[in-house]
Amino acid sequence: MSLVLLSARDRAAPRHVGLRSPRRAPCRTGLVRTLLAAAALMLLPGPGAGAEEACWAPESFRQSERDRPIRAGIAAARVALPTDEPAPPSQSFRPVDGVVRRVDLPPGAPKMIALTFDLCETPFEVAGYQGASVDTLRANGVRATFFAGGKWMLTHPDRAGQIATDPLFEIASHAWEHRNFRIVTGRPMLDEIRGPQSAYQRLRDGLAARQCAPRPGRDLAAAMPERLGLFRFPFGACNRAAIEAVGAAGLIPVQWDVSSGDPDRHLSAAGMVASVLRRVRPGSIVLFHANGRGWATDDALPEIVARLRQQGYVFVTVGELLAYPGAKPVVAASCYDETPGDTDRYDGLARLLDGRSALFAARTAAPAGDRGPAGAVSPAPSRSARVAKPALPARPAAPGPLPVGQP
């Protein structure tokens, strides 16, 4: 049997199985009904004849406390950049000259709003997954966009697949390993851009190989488009070269006009609710986190959703917001949180994280010629080999919270 993922509205909607009402059906005799039933059974595929199992058991979608914690400095955090060649952009794609912050809606349009959730992951950690927030979205039929890091997709393949195939959600790119695009240049910058698309293709191909169905009547090709279409710059930081490189890769850079501030450990759920409700307006793109660093998001999101619905807001994905007839993207020439230049302060933090990433890479590096598949780490070297290696500095402490508004 296939898994059915329906929003609350879907569950409440009537199911129409024919053009005629059963009361007016012309065939009323038991004989005719029997013959029709027999014919229908003959047309149904038998076991193994195109019948697909669900990709995931229903209970596997629910939140798990094991998913949320961020684990730093572990072997599983070492994931090789996929070598798969990304699918080329569509020839009809036209890049945006800047970064989309929100959308101006035409007169008479619904009060649409796009909730977005970042799934960031740095090189030296396996980030978390906040199933409670995702459960809230599903339980309330809320459409949303998830900006996932490419490395996060590969360390969370089941969760990434569940999001990517859910008809409520849209999955987009949040770079490969969350590097600052004001600092990273050259081939490393291009790897940050292409990595998520390659990871997404690997995820899509893996699900296709399993021959499972995300829901009845919807195959994987329909559930997961061939390419990602949207990109979010880590740290909310970029420069002109980065914007042009993202456009050349066939991606639209999307930031936000309302940040929930959820990476701040000191922000309460009530404070987050008040801040978001005070600043949203029709066409807003709102930033949250669902990677273990949305500290109060699980508690605040139910009230935010309820209050916005009371105010007449309609939840859509970023792609739907951009595609609405007559909608005009509000494009900025640079990346920022609230005011131009305010994310430049993360340059120092990014360099610190890059240094820690290099240290982690040195600690976990596999000997030449002994690299396994993505995510694999070779066995520890022999005692004699370890003795011959120079000592490394002490392992840094687990990462603390990122600054307020840091995506």
Image (cartoon, helix red, strand yellow):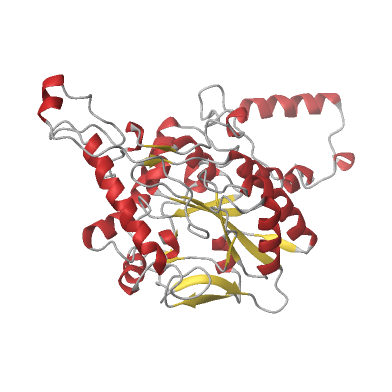
Q: Where is the N terminus found, in terms of image quarters?
A: top right
- Against 350, residue 241 (above or below) is below
The front one of 219 and 281 is 281
| Viewer-proximal residue among 116 and 364 | 364
- Work out which residue is located at the far right of the displayed protein and give it: 23
Residue at horizontal 25 percent and vertical 56 percent from the top: 188
Residue 185 location in percent, x, y?
25, 63
Residue 395 visible, this orientation:
yes
Q: Does residue 204 appear in this view?
A: no
Residue in the foreground of this view, choosing between 357 and 220:
357
The structure residue drawn at horizontal position 34% and vertical position 74%, both measured from the top left corner, is 240
Left or right side of 22 for 278: left
237 over 8 or under it: above or below: below
At horizontal 41% and vertical 51% (from top left) the residue drawn is 226
Left or right: 324 in relation to 86 = right
Q: Quadrant of residue 394?
A: top left
Task: Look at 12% across and 32% down and name the residue there.
Answer: 389
**Where is residue 182 drawn, in percent x and y?**
33, 66
What is the total number of numbered labels drawn onto the structure image? 0
Q: Nearer the viewer, residue 314 or 400?
A: 400
Residue 116 on image: x %, y % = 56, 56
For residue 208, which quarter of the picture? top left
The part of the image, by quadrant, that contains residue 114 is bottom right
Image location of residue 270, percent across then percent down: 71, 54
